[in-house]
Image (spheres, rainbow, N blue to C red):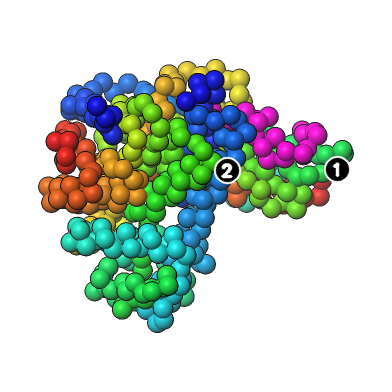
Amino acid sequence: MPMSTMPIRRARPLLGTFVDIRVDDAEEARALAAIDAAFAEIAAVHRLMSFHAHDSDVARINRDAAREAVTVDSRTHEVIVLAIEFARASAGRFDPTVAAQLVAWNLLPRPCDASLPDPAADWRDIELLADGRLRCKKPLWIDLGGIAKGYAVDRAIERLRDFGITQACVNAGGDLRRIGSGMEPVHIRSPLPPHRPICALLLGEGAVASSGSYFEWSQCSGRGVGPHVDGVTRGAMLPDRAVSVVADRCVVADALTKIVMSDADAARSVLDEWDAEALVHDSRGQQRIVGRAA
Amino acid sequence: MTRPRAIWLLPGALAALPAYHAAYAVQYMSVAESQHAAFADASEFAPVALDRAALDATVAAVPESALGNDWSPKVWQARKDGAARGWFIVDQVIGKAEAITYALALDVHGAVLGVDVLEYRETHGSEIRLPAWRKQFVGKSARDPVRLDSDIHNISGATLSCRHVTDGVRRLLALHAKALKAA
């Protein structure tokens, strides 16, 4: 690794949060070209999988897929395949079809022109077809917010690698992945006010994602609601806990945080299956590790 | 021996840790670097003075996350050999726990060419709502009373929304329509 180069770091508002990309091992011109390409890839994932945009793949699925097969980009297809795998592995605690709850709680906008979802619909009603198409057996609203950020981070890392970058870190609002030699500290935001960053782990080559609803907890019709919906109970996960997951890929870490938040002990087998480990902060601020490192 | 993927460093009970005001700051790009990145072929960035009335009218029209009377985005016109290439604007927004200086580049017609974060500062607790605290982010030379931990490279945690920047960009587009379009 040439040590003469300075790290180059850039940040842009994307995926509803701030995406920070750092390249450590390239001269400035190549680092900036790689970072630009990585941001462009993240922007593409954002465009394809946005729940808010009217012309995204997700919007088209929510509008049309109950009536006819919808063709989506290979990246959207890949994320939905993964989402269904995580839904199956977690017996539905992770479920990409919980958007109706988030709309009802005013955490997502109501999709235009989409028929109302069937309250009984879940991930099993998504049918993957050949040639990148899919169909829904019942009207439903999917939201890939629980998984697309991690996927975008993985894609960004791949783009950096295309430019010959071997030492880098991509952090999309707390879902991050690092490649290269050595290890570096990663801070995790405390789920307890005032949400200070705590140095919680040294990361080599791998990904970390964290989930907590402490920034977005609100009241709707007299009850607490947050951005994390339990796929089985369809209730909001409480804001007093937080979970961080380490895995090889960021998309895995991102999805698994929701499964561990829902039920940490039941998630043990899912963590093992994906060779992942989790740090769980409970409501008293106690921490424990779940998974292979425990 | 192979390198482990991750090593957990556990402080134990979070509640037992002292609650000092930790703050986190990153400077990503200087104004000059960002100008060059947005308009590589520009030979000049001419500062544009905005009158208070235009700023106040814009704030009234797009009130989201406005800084009220403090609002004073810096505007430049990018030029090449005297011909306008677009606009470059530096503004600041304050979110839930963060203050962000960002740059917006617009083409000559006012279409967005790009948004880059120049500086990100984060703190915690109620001090962010105090005018004195907010003021420290106005102007690059302001003294910074908050302890900055620049060693923190990466934070994982609940997602902070970038909604304030999105609102800020909308406000700058309104400013362009009101005050820059005819310039």
Quadrant in the picture for the N terminus of chain B: top left
Q: Residue at x 62, y 33 (%)?
A: A29
Amino acid carrying label 1: it is: Ala
Circle 2 — which element? Answer: helix
Circle 1 — which element? Answer: strand
List the single residue furthest toward the left: A265
* Magenta stretch: includes residue A73: no
Q: Position of residue A65 (x, y in %)?
A: 40, 76
Residue topped by disc 2: A36
Which region is colored magenta? B27-49
Circles 1 and 2 on the same chain: no
Q: Which residue is nearer to you in this view: A257 or B125? A: A257
Q: Chain of mark 2?
A: A
Q: Position of residue A169 (x, y in %)?
A: 43, 35
Residues at marks 1 and 2 touching, judged by CB atoms closer than 8 Å: no
Task: Give the Cα separation between the discs numbered 1 and 2.
Answer: 27 Å
User: Of the numbered discs in the image, which one, if any, rests on residue B83?
Assistant: 1
Task: Work out whether residue A215 can be spotted.
Answer: no
How many residues crowd around disc 2 within 10 Å: few (fewer than 14), some, or many (20 or more)? some
Q: Position of residue A55 (x, y in %)?
A: 52, 67
Task: Work out whether residue A28 can be spotted.
Answer: yes
Q: Nearer the viewer, mark 1 or mark 2?
A: 2
* Magenta stretch: includes residue B48: yes
Q: Residue at x 40, y 25 (%)?
A: B152
